[in-house]
Image (cartoon, grey):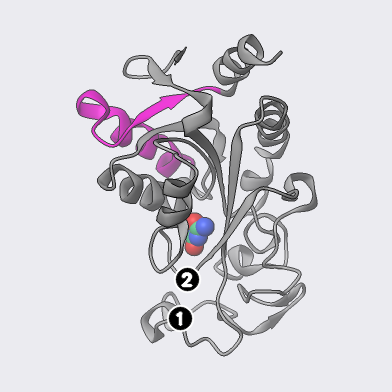
Amino acid sequence: MTELTAQPYPFAFELSHTALMIIDMQRDFVLPGGFGESLGNDVSRLASIVPTLQDILHAWRRAKGLVVHTREAHLPDLSDCPNAKLHRGQPSQKIGDVGAMGRLLIRGEWGSDIIDELKPVEGEIVIDKPGKGAFYNTPLLESLKRHGITHLVITGVTTEVCVQTTMREANDRGFECVLMEDATQSYFEKFWLSTLEMVRAQGAIVGWTATSRDLLSALQSMTP
Ligand code: C5J
């Protein structure tokens, strides 16, 4: 059992029962010209966590831990995209419209894939999800159970939307979750901070938060 320095108190985990989750680090959210920008957001805030995420991913791979990547991506015929989601927010371009990187948030399109810096490798799990939470209408729960996973190290974007929703879904399903403070980001600074504060409040009501520095040093001590 490893003890990771975390808030509100140390997070204990066994690597063989813990998965690193990298949520929605897709070109559509992180690069200019994608879905995130079509909603009027400054995407550079999200790109700022890429080097930290690379450090965590490489260390996790060296330690031989399980990695799960998610993508918010819909079927080409949009049959898995409710009208409410499609039309919400009056974006300049809707899900499925053709943007600079292909059809926005559509499976198989260049823009909906994961950025080159964090590209999945063989043996890692990739989950396409139609909702904000990674457990809704996906095989994620069965897949985690098959691998004996009980604990999740959660990273990615955006902190208060897909990351927080997934963490709450995981918590309700009995997973112990730690959110990496400097490996998650939002288009809004105050939402990033509020999410960190609310998940770890009341004695880790949703889960823990920790920094990449502490995770990397914990991983170093367990890597041969
Ligand atoms: C959003 C996400 N923000 N991955 N998706 O629409 O957080």
Q: What residue type is labelled 2?
A: Pro
Furthest toward the left, the residue is 202
Residue at image location 31% in from the left, 29% down from the top: 200
The numbered disc on residue 81 is 1
Q: Chief secondary structure of the magenta span? A: helix
The numbered disc on residue 178 is none
Query: Could you say where residue 45 lies in the image, as x and y percent from the top left?
Result: 62, 45
Furthest toward the right, the residue is 116
Residue 5 sits above or below residue 127 on the image: above
Asked whether the beta carbons under mark 2 and mark 1 sit within 8 Å of each other, the answer is yes
Residue at image location 36% in from the left, 81% down from the top: 84
The residue where tag 2 is placed is 130
How far separated are the C-alphas under marks 2 and 1?
7 Å
Mark 2, residues whose alpha carbon is within 10 Å: few (<14), some, or many (≥20)?
many
Q: What residue type is labelled 1?
A: Cys
Q: Quadrant of residue 208?
A: top left
Label 1 beta carbon within 8 A of ligand 1: no
Can you say which quadrant of the picture contains the C terminus? Answer: top right
Label 2 beta carbon within 8 A of ligand 1: no
Report the magenta residues as a range: 189-211
Q: Inspect the magenta stretch and tell me whether residue 132 lies in it.
A: no
Furthest toward the top, the residue is 221
Query: Could you say where residue 77 lies in the image, as x and y percent from the top left?
Result: 57, 90
Q: Inspect the magenta stretch and tell me whether residue 190 lies in it.
A: yes
Query: Could you say where residue 180 lies in the image, as x and y percent from the top left?
Result: 50, 31
Residue at image location 42% in from the left, 47% down from the top: 145
- Pick whichever, 172 or 117, lies toward us: 172
